[in-house]
């Protein structure tokens, strides 16, 4: 099965995670603080990192950001505290792939882990092309005119959503559901800001977009 690094300082929770994931047949190791997590995460061969936010020495957001800066793309499942919406949004902004809110059931955890491992499987992530862009979903990378640009987790999710729904108008609320999830509050302005950033990466002329088109009063429509 998979090799999973669990980063959690509370021994009971770490042990619970370890047992649940081992039950699924995964190989699991635990790191108890943010500094150690960064060291261990750089070792090759991990399929997934389960990363708590509240950690000694370096919090989960910093760990995630540092990993992505170091071009380490191992999927990250973030463990956030209950009802802290800002944490979820921030985790995804820092490059986490998904989050799960504490307390969670073993069943919920296993479902999220399975989904992330499936998503990361190379066969599910082909190259997608539109205009003069080539998107490598597995590497979260955009290639255009011979140069490469990294996509943030949000930009990647947004682009995947647009590619899935070509030619259809998506409201900002639909974008939020697809990109951030149903239980997160994100303002329209935040959506627009991320669209602007994505346009800068994919549009030949970001001021006159032809791929991510604004539909007045409704939302956005993607044209390949
Ligand atoms: Ca903790």
Image (cartoon, rainbow, N blue to C red):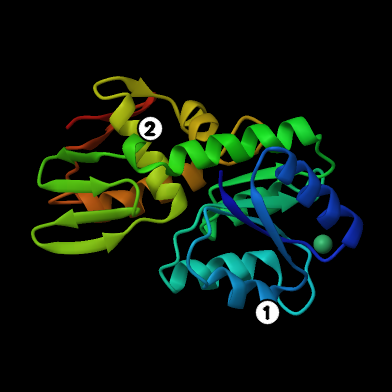
Q: Mark 1 vs ligand 1: CB under 8 Å? A: no
User: Residue 140, can we see it?
Assistant: yes
Q: Which residue is mark 2?
A: 161
Residue 48 in the image: state x and y as whole percent. Answer: 56, 53
Residue that appears at 48% across and 67% down: 44
> Counting other residues with Cα less than 10 Å from the Cα at mark 2, is it few (<14), some (14-19), or many (20 or more)?
some
Q: Which residue is mark 1?
A: 35
Are the residues flagged by discs 2 and 1 in contact, CB closer than 8 Å?
no
Q: Classify the position of ligand 1 by quadrant: top left, top right, bottom left or bottom right.
A: bottom right
Locate residue 85 relative to residue 204 in the image: left or right.
Answer: right
| Element marked by disc 2 | helix
Residue 63 in the image: state x and y as whole percent. Answer: 61, 70
Locate residue 206 relative to residue 80 in the image: left or right.
Answer: left
Locate residue 62 relative to residue 188 in the image: left or right.
Answer: right
Out of 80 and 224, give the one closest to the viewer: 80
Out of 172 and 7, give the one closest to the viewer: 7
Residue that appears at 55% across and 34% down: 115
Out of 162 and 14, give the one closest to the viewer: 14
Residue 40 in the image: state x and y as whole percent. Answer: 61, 73
Q: Mark 2 vs ligand 1: CB under 8 Å? A: no
On-image quarter of the C terminus = top left
Residue that appears at 50% across and 47% down: 190
- Disc on the earlier residue, 2 or 1: 1
**Looking at the image, residue 19 lies above or below residue 110:** below
Residue 202 in the image: state x and y as whole percent. Answer: 22, 49
Distance, label 2 to label 1, CA atoms, is 34 Å
Locate residue 159 relative to residue 38 in the image: left or right.
Answer: left
| Element marked by disc 1 | helix
**Looking at the image, residue 66 lies above or below residue 192:** below
Out of 203 and 146, give the one closest to the viewer: 146
């Amino acid at each position: 099965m998979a090799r999973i690094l669990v980063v959690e300082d509370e021994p009971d929770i770490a042990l619970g995670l370890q047992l649940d994931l081992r039950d699924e047949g995964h190989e699991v190791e635990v790191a108890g603080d943010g500094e150690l997590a960064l060291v261990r995460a750089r070792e090759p061969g991990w399929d997934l990192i389960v990363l708590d936010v509240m950690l000694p020495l370096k919090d989960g957001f910093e760990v995630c950001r540092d990993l992505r800066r170091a071009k380490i793309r191992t999927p990250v499942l973030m463990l956030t505290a209950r009802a802290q919406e800002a944490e979820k949004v921030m985790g995804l902004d820092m490059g986490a792939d998904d989050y799960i809110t504490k307390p969670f059931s073993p069943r919920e955890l296993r479902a999220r882990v399975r989904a992330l491992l499936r998503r990361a499987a190379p066969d599910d992530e082909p190259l997608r092309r539109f205009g003069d862009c080539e998107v490598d979903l597995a590497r979260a990378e955009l290639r255009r005119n011979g140069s490469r640009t990294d996509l943030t987790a949000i930009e990647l999710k947004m682009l995947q959503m647009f590619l899935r729904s070509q030619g259809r108008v998506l409201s900002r609320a639909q974008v939020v559901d697809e990109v951030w999830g149903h239980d997160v509050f994100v303002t329209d302005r935040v959506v627009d800001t991320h669209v602007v950033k994505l346009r800068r990466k994919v549009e030949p002329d970001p001021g006159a977009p032809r791929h991510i088109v604004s539909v007045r009063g409704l939302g956005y429509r993607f044209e390949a």
